[in-house]
Structures are given as structure tokens and as C-alpha cells.
Amino acid sequence: MEGLFYMAAVVAVGATLMMLTRQNAVHALLYLILSLLAVAVIFYLFGAPFAAALEVIVYAGAIMVLFVFVVMLLNLGPRAGGLEAAWLSPTVWLLPAIMAAILAGEIVYILSGPGLRTAPAGEIAPVQVGLALYGPYLIGVELASMLLLGALVGAHHLGREARSKPETKTHDVYSDVAGSDSGGDLVRAGSDRTSGAA
Amino acid sequence: MIGLLVRRNLLFILMSLEVMVNAAGLAFVVAGAGHGQADGQAMFIFILAIAAAEVAVGLALVLLLYHRYRTLDVDVASQLRG
């Protein structure tokens, strides 16, 4: 059990260090995902299977997919296809593959071998976590939901502004042709909002 | 933390923030396991929600910065509109 922990810890620290020193954003993202998976294994070894599952699903799944989407959006261009070949050279994926293989080996060992019987001493069941969340931490859950709503609205607002930035210039030309002043900008924004709400 | 201080790419700064938030979550879970309490994991779930909110807004800001300046260097955005 201790050996498993140290292996996962070495993978986590190494992957994080590699993430910090990469030049390429995609390589750094892959190392970051690897680091998060290693931390998930550490969570399991410390008797927190629910936290481990959440780490994989939410962190390595949802948040990292967001990062990958943004990197892909920023790399749009004719040279993106040429970069693809350079990204997949063996020197790039060999070390992450070895680290991921270590983690996969640990999971296979835990699930198959004697690891399952010796598994997490002092494990905290998800039931206890749920009882704590909806007992003494109920107000925290409500605050977290409000925070997520605020983040949703904020991200939508920022994204909408970024998308409509080029549009305003073209529309300004049209409004100048039509002879209306800058007040049309406000009117159009208002109509835009109502159409979005409908 | 070093990544936050050294890197000037906004994407890398966000990734370093993720690592820092994750480290805080790791500390909470391990401390909760050490004391045999479920509070550590409850705190980890809150940290998860906060990280998700932070990433959503942060990545929207990344896109905004890139659309405006065509670069991810945070130094180009060092001026306030005063």
C-alpha cells in the first residue's frame, strides 16, 4: 500500500513539474491530466473513493475538456494541421505513456490482487460525506450552487461579448449608412437580449 | 505557485491555478482521512465547485484576451482603461 502511494506521488509530482516546464500548451495539458489522475489514485489510497471518482470525472473529465476546447479554439489556422504531426512524435508521448502505465498498473493491482482486501484503512464512505454535506454544510451547498450560477452567467456574458465584437463593427457601418447615430447601438443590444431570452 | 509567478502565458497561469487548488483539495482530503472525518471530503467537493466556477470564467477571459490582442501574453493587458 505504501509502495503504491509513493509511486502515485512520484508520478503526480513529476507530471506537475513537466507541466510547468512545457512550451506547448497541449503537452502541458496532457501532463496536467496525468497529474490529476495520479492525485485521484492517492485519494483512493487514503480511503476517499468518492473524492477519487469526483476528481476523475469533474477535474480530469469536465475541466480539462474545457481547457482542451479553448486550446483548440485558439489554435485555429492553416498551420494547425502541420503541428499535429510534430505533437505526436514518440519523444513527446513516451514519458506520459510510461507514467500513465504506472497508474494503470496500480489500479489493476488494486482491483485484482490482494490490494482489494487490504484496501483503504479507515475508509470514509460516500454516505458519510453526503450526510455531512446535507447536514452541517447545507448552507455551503447552497452558496456553492449560487457561485456556480454566477460563474455561468459571467462566462456567458464574457463569451457573448467576445463573439459580438466583430459584429458591432459591421453593424456600425450599416447604422451609419442608415443615418442613425450611436443610439442605435443600445437599441440593437436591447433587441438582441430580448431575442436571446425568447 | 512557481508556474503562476514565472509563466506569462494566460493559459499556463490558469493551469497553475488548477494545480494550486488541487493541492488544497488534496490537503483537505488527506487531513480528513487522517482524522477519520467526512468533513475533509465535503470541503473537497466545495473546492471542486469553486475550481469549476473559476475555470469557466477564466477560460472566457482567455478567449476575450485572445480575440482582442491576438496573443495570450498577459503583459499586453497590463494597462487599465483609466
Image (cartoon, coloured by chain):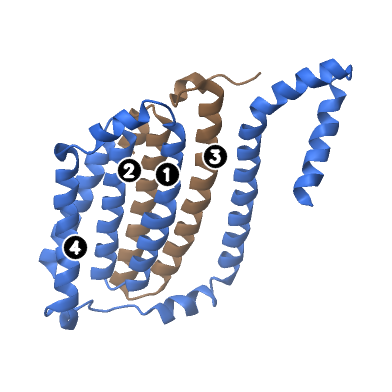
Residue A1 can be seen in this image: yes
Which residue lies under the disc numbered 2? A29
Residue A19 position, x and y percent, is 27, 40
Which residue lies under the disc numbered 4? A104
Chain B tint as drawn: brown
In the image, is residue A75 above or below residue A112?
above
Q: Which mark is residue A116?
A: none
Which residue lies under the disc numbered 3? B60
Left or right: B22, with A105 as reference point: right
Q: Check disc 1 and give the amino acid type.
A: Phe
Chain letter for the residue marked with disc 3 in the picture: B
Q: Check disc 4 and give the amino acid type.
A: Ala
Q: Quadrant of residue A144?
A: bottom right
Report, in whole angstroms, how far the alpha carbon at label 1 lies from the one at label 2. 8 Å
Residue A145 position, x and y percent, is 60, 61
Residues behind callouts 1 and 4 on a single chain: yes
Residue A115 can be seen in this image: no
Left or right: A179, with A55 as reference point: right
Q: How many marks?
A: 4
Q: Residue at x 33, y 52 (%)?
A: B23
Which residue lies under the disc numbered 1? A67
The residue closer to the viewer here, B71 or B54, is B71
Report, in whole angstroms, how far the alpha carbon at label 3 lies from the one at label 2. 17 Å
The N terminus of chain A, quarter of image: bottom left
Chain letter for the residue marked with disc 2 in the picture: A
